[in-house]
Image: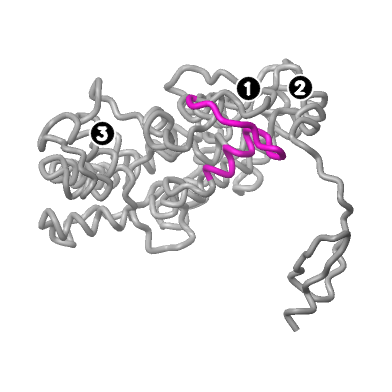
Amino acid sequence: MPGKSLIVEAGVAVRKAHADADGFVGGELRRREEREAELSAGLAPGATRPVGAGRRARAEEPDPYRLCFERDLDRVKHSRPWRRLAGKCQVFIAPEDDHLRTRLTHAVEVAQVATGIARAANLCVPLVEAIALAHDCGHGPAGHASEEAFSPYVPEATYDHAVYGADVTLARLNLCLETLDGVRNHSWRRPAPATPEGEVVAWADRIAYVCHDFEDAVRAGILTPHDLPPEVRDVVGSRGSEQIDTFLLAVLDAVRRTGHVGMTEPAASALAAFRAFNFDRIYLRPAARRQADRVIALLRGLVEHFADVPTRIPDLAGSGDAITPGSPDAAAAAVHYVSGMTDRYALGLGVELLGWQPENLPRGV
C-alpha cells in the first residue's frame, strides 16, 4: 500500500520509494567546503582547484554541496544545446544507421577518454568532464561545413564552433570561466587552454574522433579495416579499443615522465598519421566535398531566409524586440537559430521554406 511507504522518524515524515526499503546510510552529509579541502589535498600541483561558486561572468552564491564545476556539469547535461547534439552528425549527415556517431555520442566518448586520463593524473575530474561534454555545443548541423556556411554572417567572417560555443551557445548557462576556456580552446588551431584539464580534453577529442571516425567509415562501407596504414596499425593496433587505450596510456606516460600534458612517441606520430589518413580518405574525399557544398548552400539559404524575416525566429517572435530585417543583428540572430538546428530539422526546412527537392539535399553516406 502507498501509505506504508510513509514513515515518521526523529519527528521527520519521509516517504520511501519502496515500502520494504532499508537503505539506511546515516545522517551525515559532506558539505562543499569539506569536499573542496579533500579534493585540493589530493590533486596534482598544477590541477585546477574548485573554490566556492567559481569564477563566473555573473556572480552566484555557492552551492551547499556541489563543487562549482559539478554545477557546470549539471547545467550542461540539462541544457538544450547539449541535448540537440543527439541530432547533429559527427561525420555522416542525418545517418540512417543508428550505430554511427552523433555529436552527442562523440562528446560522451571524449569525456570517457578525458576522465580516464584525469583520474590517473590527479586532475580535477568534474572540470574535465564539463569541458568534454560541452566542447562541441557550438557546432551547427551537418558537420564542419556549417562553419564555412556561417562565416560570412559573423564578426571577422570567421565562425569557429569552439569560440561560438563558449561565447554564444553556452552563454546563458553562466559557466565557470575555466570551463568556458576549455571549450573555447579545445581545438588545436586555437591558443592553448589555460588549465591542464582543458589540455587533456584537447587530446581526448583528437584521440576519440580519429579512432571512431575511422570505425564509422568502415561501418558505412567507405573503408575496410585493412585500409589503415601500417605506420598506424603497427603502433596502435587495428581495434578501436586497443587504439584508444594505446593513445591514452601514451598521454599518461608523458605526464608521468615530464609532468606535462602531451603524448609520447611513437604514439604521437601514429596519431598524426591516423588523422592525416582520415582527412584524405574520409573528410576530404570527393563525395564528402560535394555534400559539404550542398550543406553550405542549404545553411546559407536558411540564414538569409530568417535574417530577412527575423520575426520567424522563435525566440524573437512576439518578444517585442524590434530587429531590422537584413541587418547585422538579424543575421546574428539567424545564425544563432540555424546553428542550433539538428540535421533533420535543417534538411526539412530546406524543403519546406527554400523549395529544395529532397533528392538534392545533402546526404551522409
Looking at the image, can residue 253 be seen?
yes
Q: Earlier in the sequence, mark 2 or mark 3?
A: 2
Hey, which quadrant is residue 306 in on the image? Answer: top left
Query: Is residue 73 a member of the stretch shown in magenta?
Result: yes
Q: Is residue 34 left or right of residue 245?
A: right
Q: Which type of secondary structure does the marked residue at label 3 adopt?
A: helix
Q: Amino acid at mark 2?
A: Ala
Mark before the other along the chain sequence, 2 or 1? 2
Q: Disc 2 vs disc 1: Cβ atoms closer than 8 Å?
A: yes
Residue 77: image location, x then y, percent: 54, 47
Q: Position of residue 154 (x, y in %)?
A: 24, 28
Task: Quote the CA–CA distance across marks 2 and 3.
Answer: 40 Å
Query: Tag 2's secondary structure?
Result: loop
Q: Amino acid at mark 3?
A: Glu
- Which residue is at the front of the view, 118 or 23? 23
Q: Are marks 2 and 3 in contact (CB under 8 Å)?
A: no
Against 167, residue 236 (above or below) is below
Q: CA distance from mark 2 to mark 1?
A: 10 Å
> The N terminus is located in which quarter?
bottom right
First of labels 3, 1 by sequence position: 3
Q: Which mark is residue 44?
A: 2
Residue 22, located in which quarter of the rendered image?
Answer: bottom right
Question: Which residue corresponds to mark 1?
Answer: 196
In this picture, residue 141 sits left or right of residue 191: left
The residue identified by callout 3 is 148
